């Protein structure tokens, strides 16, 4: 088994986990950045596993904004605090992006307020930006505590009792952009939402023999676009990792025209919001619509799904997978030591894995650098074998039979005709 893999184990009931001064160990839980379906399942799992292991969980409300604000922004949680939330989308403890937390003054406030509650362990659920900020806070913690003690905001005894911050991360992001993980929280639910929309659009598109261009989320990751295109039986897809080459407009139009000649009544193009050409110029859904209108005379329509992809009830997978991740994160944060490097708890090869936090975040951010350097093969490879295989499978599934010469001539005649 991989050295970072762990098998889910039942959390056994224990006596309270105590600090050296006899207090129960306290764990803060926060969700940060964009919300994702399944976050509530993860929060619930962390809370109940933490309680079962004898520690006291706290909610840090509205992401880091709650830590900076203090007061009701940090609240103790009990077993029933997280009842009846599995079916709810979003996050019951709120999420926000905090500009104050990026400043040292904001981090001082956050540290002071956490120390007021005796919290020096955190489980953070969010994207790579949230986890990067968390690791920076962890790194700054000893200096922040020293400064708080020197200023009198924190007693020397409290400072000495909490010399380090222990953190564990879970990625909550519908983009599924974490390199090294198979699925992140919210991806499966978002894909279901996209497919529901594609299925609904397809019926009206077929009725009118119309083409639709659908934009889905994915600034630097084309997972949602690609998987939706495969599962939705779409004709063409544009993803950030593999920008189309020169002449892609003609290739797209030819492919759609062949599909119509082969008997398709409707056409569907999926565009990831971060799609570009090979020179880095953005390709929007509107750009695609104009190309189809000008070159094929298609009555194409644009649908931008937007935040509907992040809303609604989580799928069964996002409920149980997030529960596994939350239980593992609770165990990790309670068994880690001050010398432990922070990890991300993730699902890989149907196992719960402990991934080095900053190493995986660096690998994730490197994908957009590979695209910028026009190393598209490297960018696709970074997404894993299943991503590259799906690109090939989509091409096989979406390529119609060859046109006869007469039909091909008709296409070029239409393309040359004035609009």
Image (spheres, rainbow, N blue to C red):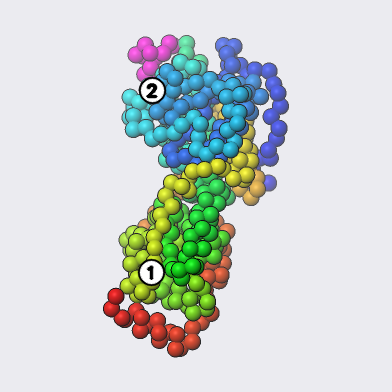
Quadrant where the C terminus sits is bottom left
Is residue 152 on the magenta stretch? yes
User: Mark 1 falls on what kind of element?
Assistant: loop
Identify the residue position indicated by label 2 in the image: 69
> In the image, which residues are magenta?
146-156
Rounded to the nearest angstrom, the CA distance separating label 1 from label 2 is 52 Å
The residue positioned 46% from the left and 27% from the top of the image is 61
Q: Which residue is nearer to you in this view: 275 or 355?
A: 275
Instruction: Point out the residue furthest to the left here.
Output: 418
Q: Residues within 10 Å of mark 1 (few under 14, many from 20)?
A: some
Which percent across, then down, holds residue 96?
A: 41, 34
Is residue 358 found left or right of 316 in the rendered image? left
Q: In the image as oriented, which residue stretches furthest toward the front? A: 207
Q: In the image, which is nearer the foreground, mark 1 or mark 2?
A: 1
The numbered mark at residue 80 is: none
Q: Which residue is drawn at 56% across and 67% down?
A: 393
- Using the rendered image of the protein, determine whether residue 394 is visible from the camera's viewpoint: yes
Image position, residue 85 (x, y; %) = 58, 33
- Residue with the most extreme bottom position: 406
* Residue 391, percent from left and from top: 52, 64
User: Does 279 lie within the magenta span?
Assistant: no
Locate residue 53 relative to residue 171 in the image: left or right: right
Q: What residue sits right under mark 1 in the picture?
A: 299
């Amino acid at each position: 088994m991989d050295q970072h893999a762990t098998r889910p184990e039942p959390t056994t009931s224990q006596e309270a986990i105590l600090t050296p001064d006899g207090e129960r160990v306290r764990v803060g839980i926060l969700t940060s950045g964009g919300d994702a379906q399944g976050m509530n399942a993860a929060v619930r799992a962390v809370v109940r596993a933490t309680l079962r292991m004898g520690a006291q969980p706290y909610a840090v409300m509205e992401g880091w904004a709650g830590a900076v604000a203090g007061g009701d922004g940090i609240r103790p949680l009990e077993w029933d605090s997280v009842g009846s939330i599995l079916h709810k989308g979003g996050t019951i403890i709120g999420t926000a992006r905090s500009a104050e937390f990026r400043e040292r003054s904001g981090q001082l406030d956050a540290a002071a307020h956490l120390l007021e509650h005796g919290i020096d362990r955190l489980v953070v659920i969010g994207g790579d930006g949230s986890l990067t900020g968390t690791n920076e806070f962890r790194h700054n913690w000893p200096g922040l505590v020293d400064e708080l003690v020197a200023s009198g905001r924190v007693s020397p005894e409290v400072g000495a009792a909490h010399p380090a911050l222990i953190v564990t991360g879970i990625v909550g992001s519908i983009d599924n952009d974490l390199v090294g993980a198979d699925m992140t929280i919210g991806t499966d639910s978002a894909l279901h939402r996209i497919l529901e929309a594609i299925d609904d659009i397809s019926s009206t598109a077929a009725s009118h023999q119309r083409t639709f261009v659908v934009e889905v989320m994915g600034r630097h990751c084309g997972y949602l676009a690609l998987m939706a295109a495969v599962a939705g039986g779409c004709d063409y897809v544009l993803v950030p990792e593999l920008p189309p080459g020169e002449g892609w407009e003609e290739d797209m139009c030819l492919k759609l025209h062949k599909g119509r000649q082969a008997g398709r009544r409707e056409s569907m193009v999926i565009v990831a919001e971060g799609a570009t050409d090979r020179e880095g110029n953005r390709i929007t859904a509107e750009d695609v619509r104009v190309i189809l209108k000008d070159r094929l005379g298609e009555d194409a329509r644009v649908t931008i799904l937007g935040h509907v992809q992040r809303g609604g009830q989580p799928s069964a997978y996002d409920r149980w997978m997030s529960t596994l991740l939350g239980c593992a994160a609770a165990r990790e944060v309670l068994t880690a030591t001050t010398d432990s490097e922070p990890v991300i708890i993730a699902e890989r090869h149907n196992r719960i894995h402990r991934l080095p936090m900053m190493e995986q975040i660096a690998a994730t951010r490197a994908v957009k650098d590979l695209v910028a350097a026009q190393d598209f093969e490297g960018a696709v490879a970074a997404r894993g074998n299943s991503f590259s295989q799906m690109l090939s499978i989509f091409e096989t599934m979406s390529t119609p039979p060859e046109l006869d010469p007469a039909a091909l001539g008709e296409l070029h005649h239409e393309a040359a005709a004035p609009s």
